[in-house]
């Protein structure tokens, strides 16, 4: 199943073969309920092994158009992870300090250490997307950045950091529906940003930019996964399945401990020795009391 949604590069217009309405023939969320819960349990167990072994870290990267559900999928798929070993990072317009560094600096410093999971809501890919669409960088610079990105991702992998790249794919009609919902729902109005409507004018340019991203940065080692996201329940299920699959490929195990070297300590447990001495002392005191009474 996952193979259908995986990109490994060299497709010129990859998004054209994916339907945002796709649910892989599954009719509704009820069909997936049991498997979804099973996958969540498996993910929690994998996190336990990841944290215990400290052999790898996992970076889960979410990209997508506005309203594609990046926040939502993190909340619904990853929120039940142990917070001691998980964090989410979100990236907006660079600060003055961030803009003064290379474009990878602000994301590199928050990649996960071994034993931990980090989710990126947007990422360094914005520096070959929004910057390109708004012509803040030229095509020559974009080409250089693609090379830096692939080398950066190789560096992460060589350092033991597994990378999962997920694009949440929605249709323009679905996006407009979500924007309108935000504008009339008091509980979602805070999410509304007029720039979301402004950016819709560049929909086709963003699609072309994403296609170029997939063409240049999807590899066998670091594929992109295209997740149809018009149906939130299928989006969450497929994203979770992709993440669990990535964990399984790490073959994580709990660290082994040589108990033999602790055997002498167990045989001569200091607490047991103290308790034994206290018992002898208590017996002697009791005997003295009895003799005194006699």
Image: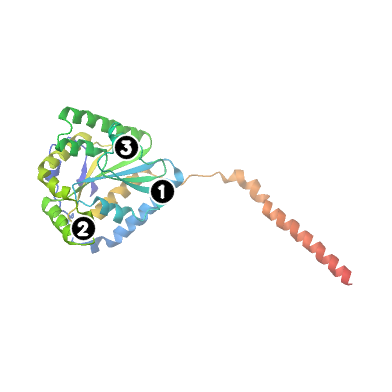
Distance of label 1 from label 2 (alpha carbons): 32 Å
Closest to the observer: 172 or 188? 188
Q: Secondary structure at mark 1?
A: helix
Badge 1: few (under 14), some or many (20 or more) residues near its Cα, within 10 Å? Answer: some
Would residue 118 be visible to someone looking at this image? yes
Of 113 and 42, which appears nearest the observer? 113
Alpha carbon of mark 3 to alpha carbon of mark 2: how far? Answer: 29 Å
Residue 129 seen in this snapshot: no
Q: Check disc 1 and report the residue beneath it.
A: 85
From this view, report whether residue 98 is shown above or below residue 63: above
Answer few, some or many: residues within 10 Å of disc 3's Cα (few below 14, many 20 plus, some between 14 and 19). some
Q: Residue at x 39, y 50 (%)?
A: 46
Task: Report the residue marked by disc 3.
Answer: 106
Camera-near label (3 vs 1) is: 3
* Residue to which mark 2 is pinned: 189
Depth check, front residue: 201 or 119:
201
Secondary structure beneath disc 3?
helix
Task: Assess disc 2: are there few (<14), some (14-19) or many (≥20) residues with their C-alpha within 10 Å of its C-alpha.
Answer: some
Image coords of residue 259 (percent x, y): 57, 46
Q: Position of residue 38 (x, y in %)?
A: 33, 58
- Of mark 3 and mark 2, the one earlier in the sequence is 3
């Amino acid at each position: 199943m996952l193979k259908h949604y995986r990109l490994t590069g060299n497709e010129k217009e990859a998004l054209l073969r994916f339907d945002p309405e796709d649910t892989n023939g599954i009719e509704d969320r009820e069909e997936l309920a049991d498997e979804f819960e099973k996958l969540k349990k498996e993910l929690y167990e994998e996190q336990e092994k990841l944290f215990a072994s400290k052999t790898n870290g996992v970076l889960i990267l979410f990209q997508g158009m506005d309203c594609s559900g990046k926040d939502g999928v993190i909340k619904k798929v990853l929120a039940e992870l142990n917070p001691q070993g998980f964090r989410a990072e979100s990236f907006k317009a660079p600060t003055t300090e961030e803009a003064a560094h290379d474009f990878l600096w602000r994301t590199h410093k928050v990649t996960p250490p071994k034993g931990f999971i980090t989710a990126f809501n947007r990422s360094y890919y914005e520096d070959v997307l929004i910057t390109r669409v708004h012509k803040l960088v030229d095509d020559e610079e974009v080409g250089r950045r693609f090379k830096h990105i692939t080398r950066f991702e190789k560096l992460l992998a060589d350092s033991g950091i597994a990378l999962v790249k997920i694009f949440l794919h929605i249709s323009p009609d679905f996006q407009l529906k979500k924007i309108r919902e935000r504008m009339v729902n008091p509980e979602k109005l805070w999410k509304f940003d007029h720039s979301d409507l402004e950016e819709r004018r560049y929909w086709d340019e963003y699609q072309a930019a994403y296609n170029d991203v997939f063409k240049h940065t999807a590899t066998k080692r670091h594929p992109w996964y295209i997740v149809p996201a018009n149906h939130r329940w299928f989006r969450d299920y497929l994203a979770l399945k992709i993440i669990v699959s990535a964990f399984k490929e790490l073959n994580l195990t709990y660290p082994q401990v040589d108990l033999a070297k602790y055997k002498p300590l167990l045989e001569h447990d200091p607490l047991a020795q103290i308790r034994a001495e206290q018992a002898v002392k208590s017996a002697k005191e009791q005997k003295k009391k009895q003799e005194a009474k006699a």
